[in-house]
Each structure stands twice: as structure tokens, then as C-alpha cells.
Image: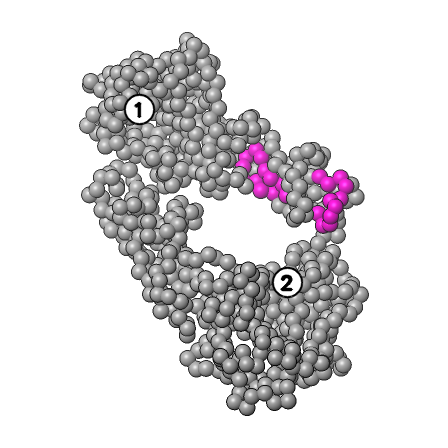
Amino acid sequence: MLAYVCVMLLSACNKQVFGPTGQGYLSLSMESDLSADVIVKAGADVQPVYAIDVYNEADQKVAHADDHTTVTTANPIKLQLGTYKIKAASGEDVNAAFDNPIYKGEVSGVKIIPDKTTMATITCTQANTAFSVEFPADFDQSFSQYYVKVSNGIGESLILSNSPDSSDPLQAAFSSKAYFAVTGTLTWELFLLNKDGGEYKTSMSYTDVKAKSHYHLKFSLSEDGPSDGSFTITVTLDNTLEETDYDMVLDFDTAGMPSFSSAGQMEISSAVPVVVPVGNDATKILEISTSEGLKSFVLVHNNESLSSLGLPDAVEFVGEDAQRDALMSSLGIQVSNLVQTKALSAGAKGVRMDITDFVKNLPLGSYGLSCIAIDNKSRSDVFNLILEIISDVDAEAVEAKSAWAAFAKLEGRYFKNPAPEGLRFMYREKSASNWKEVAASDIEMNEGQLRFSTMLTGLKASTTYVFKAVSAKDTETKEIEFTTAQTQTIHNLNFDNWHTSGNILMPNAEGYSVWDSANSAGVTITTSSTDEAVSGKAARLESVTAFGLLAAGNIFTGEFVGLDGLGAKLNWGVPFTARPIAMRGYYKYTPKAIDKVKDPYKDLKGQMDQSQILCFLTDWSSPFLVNTNTKSFVDTENDPGIIALGQLNSSNSDSGYVRFTIPLVYRDNSRIPRYIVIAAASSRYGDYFTGGVGSVLLVDEFELIYDPEELTDAEFNAVFSMVDPF
């Protein structure tokens, strides 16, 4: 299926789209061609619904839409100017499901530029593999039950049956199609039960299976019909323009079918996980025997770790292949004829597969492999081997998640229930020699997954630590290092430094340009105060009348750019790359009744004025250009560039300073900021020339908080109310 996703940038002639904001809008238009490049069409000619994800140049997701049809020119996605990658996907992305075609596509280099229309096209194709079967109507005359079980080598199998169990989502009638995630392998097993109660099973595997493939099997009986308890059956694989036929004689005699057994010092079993300590060298041998001789013996898997070790997704062992044998030997897998110790040849009546060295060299982890044996009567058996390679100690460290400056999450695991006695974490600075212990009350257990974890607080920023998981028996275990993130502050957070530049009072020490205010517009309404300070000096913000309009006292990180009519243009934000979790400080507010109003806040006249203190982190590509004349302001609720936001609004009249803590509520737990915006105003709606003349806000001693130990539980929970910290 081909789908075309059109991405358009709205023309800048619409002020709501661009103006001076440095932003653009993304709208989508989609066309789909459902004539996928497969032999059998994938269902009705219905337009799929695509989920849309937009990624910036740092490959961070900045926008999402569940339904592409909701993203139109009337309802676009707002983006900062820049270059983006857009991904489209339809369908539920699961390993195996019936009637669930999944289509995916992406396009890179989509530029959002003012005054131009940008068109991008995503080509979406089917991302999974389809499988279906077809039986003739006269099958029911000979067989009371028949089905085909299909698997891609991982997860659950799907069954297409003449009598599916409607309560089982893994079974469906022959009219359905089974869809699988692409693993490179498909294995199907045919089961037949004839009218006399005789059973028959056979299976076949396909390798090099790719996306946008449809394997359609057509079964048919020979015209000769039943004879001496046997049938002749034709299987047609319809996956290319030329049909391929396989003729099989079905013998319902189960005697001498392929069978698996375990030999060696350690018993291995099918489907039940075999738990093996890492480095264990006990002999592990799997034997396969059949009286009719083997036609095929295949080892398949779908495990990234095994692939990285060099084990192919599917290996056929019948027949001579020196290159294959050398590779298997290097991996510690020895396959030979069960009777004579030599290479496995067609017709051999037994297989000996020694995996002792293979298992011995496996790193910690879980591995699934399937062994498929098919005899010369096309009868088969499958042995599913699941290996759990565990540590040879009670517990071990797994991972430290430490993207924060003063706290990290430590994770460990243990290897059998009940949990070993004395299970705990130990940690230290890498440069220190003494270990510290995490209290048992601070450890969270996950008995279902044999995992345990803790959140470690009070850490030093930009510091490398070492931790380990220990028990009463094992204290010298694997150690894992992690390094905490940096902290960062900005100049003059305590508002003690001021200087005059060209008769304009600036809230910075001379030589710095971190803070600015409305003073730069020619009206001195932000001043320093020594008498009314918590310590040193404080910033005093007062709302006054200027040119007949309200001008709110304000202070912000950024710079005054210039005037635009009766309004001002301001660049909000200064460079900042750390991730604080809160801002703390002091304020004192003396509000007046609102007596100056403008749209859209005329209805506030007479109400008590409000102050505002804001702090937020962004990954904008540049500071945000505010224009009070054109009402171009940061949309703090919806701006995709905002990573974390905190604000405090107050209309209280304070007799003294109030100590405040503003949690920074994170919207994303992975993106790194580029800018920080801190702003305070004596009138919350001063940008709209609305407020009370004479309202005064004093602010002092701001600081950025990084350690959860400095917050209450409620404040810390607020920080991560939208996302998990890890």
C-alpha cells in the first residue's frame, strides 16, 4: 500500500500563523493506494487512519496526533521554525494478530519556513507479513478437524481453523488473515484429524521473510482420494507470480515420528525455561530420532543478542556446508549424526546437537530457540528451548537511571523466590572507599519479575558513583558506574546586582545581559530596593500608567528588542542546559483593584489585581520573540518546545515576605533544555494593558532546586505528575 502524506506550511499572510513568533504550522493531507504489492489484497479498500509523530533535529518527539484526519489547515500542528522528521503509522503494532495490516512510513528534512508552503510526501508501505490458507470444500468429507498453526519464531502462534474457538483471540476461521511482525522467519504446522480418528502433523519454515509479503497456502486433495489410510495432498505457496506446488503423502501412522530427548549432565526441556548460571559447563545435549530418516533439521531464533553473537536467524543442518559448520563450531554448537559421529546427511535417523559450549559462553539474559525436525514422510516435531542465563550470585546490579543532578534510580535483580536474605543496595562515590547502604524501607520489590529498585537522593551533581546489589551471602558482586547530571544557575538570581546603562536601570552586574525589564522601553517601573529586601537588594515591580495605558512592572530573563507602536518586543529566554525540578524564593505583593483594562480582559475591572511568577525550560532553537502590540505571547499550555513549567499567581495582600516553592512540572523526561525563562510581573495581565495602577510586587533570593530532599512529597509528585522521572 502506498500512502502520501502532504505536509503544508500555512502562508505567513495570516498573522495567527507567523507574525513575529518564530513559529509555523504543520497540516496534513493524505491519500492511500491500497493495492499493496502482495498477491492477495489485504482486505477492503478502506483508508487507514495514521498516527503522526513529528521529531526535531535532535530526534526528539515534539508533536503527536492520534488521527491524521484531525490535522488540517483549520487545525494545524504548531511548530517552531526548523527542520523536522515526520513518521506515520497505522494499525496496532503487535507481534501477531488477525486482520491487522500495519502501514508505516517517514520523511526527513521537512523545513518549516515563514512565507512559504512546504510540501512533503511520506510513502507508507505494509510493515508486517500476512499469512492465509485456503482449503477445498470437500476437505470436510475426509477430515473432522484441521487447522494451520503459524509463528514468526517469537511470541504466540496464531491458528487458522475449520472450528476455531471464538473465545480465543489466537484462533480464527480460514476467512481471516494472520499478520506477523517481520522476523525473517515464518513456520507453519498443519494438523489433520480424519474421520477414523487418525492424526497427522507436518510443518515447514520459510526464511528471508520480508515486510509486505503475503504467504497464501492452498491445500487440495488428489483426485485418487483415500487409499490404504493415506492421502495425497498438494500445497501451493502463492507468494510470487508463479505458484509453487508441494506434493506430500500424508501417512496417519504416528509410529516413528521425529521426537526429541535430552542427554548429558543437564536436562533440557521444551517450552519450560531452563535456568543456567552464567559460565555453567555441564554437558547439554539434545537428541532427535526418527525411524523414517530426516529430511530437514532447522534451528531458528529471533533474538537480537544471538544475532549480535553471529548466530543466523535460521540454520539448516541437513547437507554438507563447510562454511556453516565452521560458524557453528565457533559458536559452540556441534551437530552430528546420532549413530555415526559425522556431519548430518539427508536420511539420517537421528541427530545429536551438543550446545554445551554455546550455553557456557552466553551472557546474562533470556534466549529462545526453536528446533524443527521433519522426516521423509513430512511429519514434524518442534522443540522450543528457552534459556535463562542467570548470575552465579544471589543478586546483581542491573542499571542506574541517572539523568538528574541529585537523584537516580538503581535497579537490581535476584534469581529465585523467595528473595534472598539481606537483599539491598550499596553505593559510593567512585573516588571514595567507604560504601553507603540503602535502607531496606527505601527498596521497592517486584516479586513477579524478580527485580528490586530504589530512588537514591542527596547525590552530588556531575559526580561518578558506583553501586552494587548484595545479599547476606554475596557482598562482592558486579559493580555499575553512573554519573549524575550537571547543575546550573544564572546570574543575579538574588537580585543584588544592578547598574545603570544610558540612564536605564538594569537588573544585572555591569558586563552581564541576563535580565531585562520594561525599563528599557523608557519607563522606570522596575527598581531595586534595599529597605524591603530579604537580603541585600530585592527587585521592586510596580504597575503604573504610561501613555494612558497600564504598564506592569516586570523582570525577565532575556532582552528588550524594541518598541512596536505602543507595545514592546522582547526576546524571552537565556541559554540553559540543566534540569532543575523547582524554583524557590520570596515575594511580597500589595495589589490594587484593576482599573485599567483592555480586551480580552475588560470583565476583570474592579477585581483585585494578580501578580505572576513564571519559570519554564524549553528546547527552542532560539529565544521566543514576544510582541505585546500584536499579542504574540508564549502559549504556555500548548507550546511543544516547553519541557517543564511552573507558575505562581497571587492576589493576596502580604504583610511580609512569603517564601514560595514552584515545582517545575515536566512534560518530557528525556529532552535537554536549551533555554530558561524566568519572569515576574506586578500585574498578571499587564501584557494586555490590564491591571491595577499602584500594584507592587517585591521578589528576592530566587534559587533553582535540584534535590528531591529539598521538596515535600506533594511538591515532588507535582514535578512528575505528567511523566515518570525515569
Q: How many neighbours does mark 1 have within 10 angstroms: few (below 14), some (14-19), or many (20 or more)?
A: many
Image coordinates for residue 223, horizontal then vertical, percent: 52, 89
Relative placement, left or right, of 562 versus 272 is left
Name which residue lies at 53% across and 84% down.
221
Q: Is residue 199 magenta?
A: no
N-term-proximal mark, 1 vs 2: 2
Image coordinates for residue 260, horizontal then vertical, percent: 71, 72
Q: Is residue 98 above or below residue 577?
A: below
User: Which residue position is annotated with label 1?
Assistant: 685
> Magenta part mainly helix, strand or loop?
loop
Q: Residue 475: tell me if it is visible.
A: no
Q: Any mark on residue 368, and which?
A: 2
Name which residue lies at 34% across and 60% down.
47
Name which residue lies at 47% across and 68% down.
176
Quarter of the rendering containing residue 100: bottom left
Dot 1 and dot 2 residues touching (CB under 8 Å): no
Between 376 and 407, the residue placed more toward the observer is 376
Count of residue discs: 2
Considering the image in quadrants, where does the C terminus appear?
Answer: top right
Q: How many neighbours does mark 2 have within 10 angstroms: few (below 14), some (14-19), or many (20 or more)?
A: some
Name which residue lies at 43% across and 58% down.
91
Q: CA distance from mark 1 to mark 2?
A: 62 Å
Image coordinates for residue 208, horizontal then vertical, percent: 52, 72
Magenta span of residues:
400-424
Callout 2 secondary element = strand
Mark 1 belongs to which amino acid? Tyr
Mark 2 belongs to which amino acid? Gly
